[in-house]
Image (cartoon, rainbow, N blue to C red):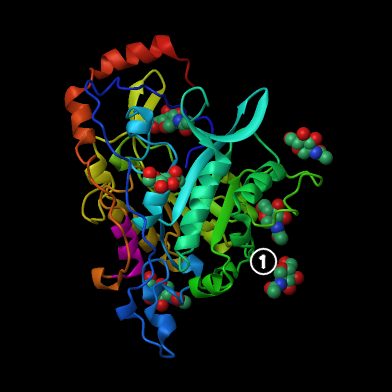
Amino acid sequence: MKPISSFFLLLPTLLLGSAQQISSGGVITPSLPTPAQVTPTPSIQSIIPCNNSPLLCNRPHNNITHIGAHDSSFLRDSSTSNSVAGNQFFNATIALSAGVRLLTAQVHTLSSSDSTLHLCHSYCALLDAGPLTTWLSAIKYWLDNNPNDVITLILVNSDNQPASAFGEAFDSSGISSYGFVPPPNSSNSSSSSGEWPTLQSMISSNKRLVTFIASIPTTTSNSTSAYPFLLPEFQYIFETSYNITSPSQFNCELDRPSLAQSSSKAIQSGLLPLINHFQYIDLGSGIQIPDVSDIGTTNSPDTKTQGNLGKHLMDCKREWEGVSQKPVFVLVDFFDRGPSVEAGDLMNGLLEKDIVGRVKPKSQQEQIGAAAEKKGVPVVALVGFLGVAVVLL
Ligand SMILES: *[C@@H]1O[C@H](CO)[C@@H](O)[C@H](O)[C@H]1NC(C)=O
Ligand SMILES: *[C@@H]1O[C@H](CO)[C@@H](O)[C@H](O)[C@H]1NC(C)=O
Ligand SMILES: *[C@@H]1O[C@H](CO)[C@@H](O)[C@H](O)[C@H]1NC(C)=O
Ligand SMILES: *[C@@H]1O[C@H](CO)[C@@H](O)[C@H](O)[C@H]1NC(C)=O
Ligand SMILES: *[C@@H]1O[C@H](CO)[C@@H](O)[C@H](O)[C@H]1NC(C)=O
Ligand SMILES: *[C@@H]1O[C@H](CO)[C@@H](O)[C@H](O)[C@H]1NC(C)=O
């Protein structure tokens, strides 16, 4: 995921001469098994799927690859007039129903006079996806209806708000009761890989929401002790580079936190790897927008071509075989393409027959990228427009 210095624009209909009416709808159905699949026998726990597969129930959370929607609240759909700043075609709960199990977003205060937390893309004046509480309520509703699923959130604390501000938003959405608090030594410990619970254990205790914040101010008085489920991201996670503009740049090297030195050292110290796998088009003048033109290659679960999601994940898994870790968290733009979740299946050793209860998003927007390419104004003109319209970076 990107830090707050990212820079995206709301450019309604600029690239889409004739914006189509596109429904952001999608049916949410619980990923519970159909009655025929459940038999009242002692083996019931191995039949009910956890995160869409019975084979995942008994795996520790950190021995599973969780595919994530990067900037999951920033949509390129009718709600934003197909903003080129949007990172996803479908919203966060549609993503969850499709098999995504990690969501990220940037959290800002609405304005200098209103400290309500909103999900905004770089600036609330550019793309405001609404209050954090509203978004969390929708996710809580999804968790309520999908009792066998464990999900992870990573929220960027763009305006350096205290843990209490986040905690209050979590409380008022009602989602706090799902908050997972890791046992001591899940972070930093060299033996941490054995310490994350299995999905089944998290499901049984109904602590099915793992929440990381980047970053929480750590003064004693504003510590997270009142909200122990708000976990400081970089005490648990290291990330690969997010600043990718060409398929050849995807790699498995540690980017943050730099103190952890290298991927293998980070893994040995118990940090879980997060692979950033999304690509930007650099329009010049420091302007980058999510690259949808290459998305078929970028999100492909294939392992053959440089830039493929499957290849990137497989390369990292091979590189980290010596330290016995596979990619745990993965972030993509336009998650429905690929489909990206199939690259997670590959890492998790799951075949199509092992997957239960995913709901594919409706695909009215399949051609939107191509449409943007065809109908769009020339990039040169766009750069000119941005250059006068907005100061970025
Ligand atoms: C996504 O869209 C569906 C259908 O419009 C809606 O019910 C759901 O609450 C939305 N989810 C989020 C996170 O906004
Ligand atoms: C970890 O996941 C792999 C599949 O990727 C599986 O073969 C292995 O049994 C799992 N280990 C544990 C301890 O669950
Ligand atoms: C956790 O870590 C502390 C300090 O590193 C150590 O004293 C303690 O024994 C550890 N606890 C467990 C359960 O490993
Ligand atoms: C975990 O690591 C962080 C940063 O390296 C350090 O500040 C903290 O004291 C460590 N915590 C424990 C329990 O070792
Ligand atoms: C906690 O942080 C908030 C916002 O940064 C600040 O207004 C408040 O004074 C802090 N509380 C204490 C006790 O430091
Ligand atoms: C991104 O990478 C380019 C080179 O590929 C570099 O010039 C630029 O400074 C980087 N930007 C950030 C924000 O890291």
| Towards the viewer: 235 or 47 | 47
Please tell me in which quadrant of the rendered image residue 25 appears: top left
Rendered position, 212 above or below 160: below
Q: Measured from the top left, where is residue 246 in percent x and y? A: 30, 37
| Towards the viewer: 310 or 164 | 164
Instruction: Indicate left or right for 230 with 378 as reference.
Output: right
Q: Give the dominant element type of the magenta stretch: helix, strand or loop.
A: helix
**Ligand 2 lies in which image quarter?**
bottom left
Q: Measured from the top left, where is residue 224 in percent x and y? A: 72, 51
> In what element is the residue under mark 1?
loop
Q: Magenta region: which residues?
A: 341-350
- Residue linked to disc 1: 185
- Would the CB of label 1 be found within 8 Å of ligand 3? yes
Q: Is residue 308 visible?
A: yes
Q: Measured from the top left, where is residue 34 in percent x and y? A: 32, 74
Residue 3 belongs to the span the image colors magenta: no
| Towards the viewer: 162 or 3 | 162
Residue at point 55% right, 74% down? 204
Q: Residues within 10 Å of mark 1 (few under 14, many from 20)?
A: few
Rendered position, 42 above or below 280: below
| Towards the viewer: 144 or 357 | 144
**Residue occupying the far right of the picture:** 221
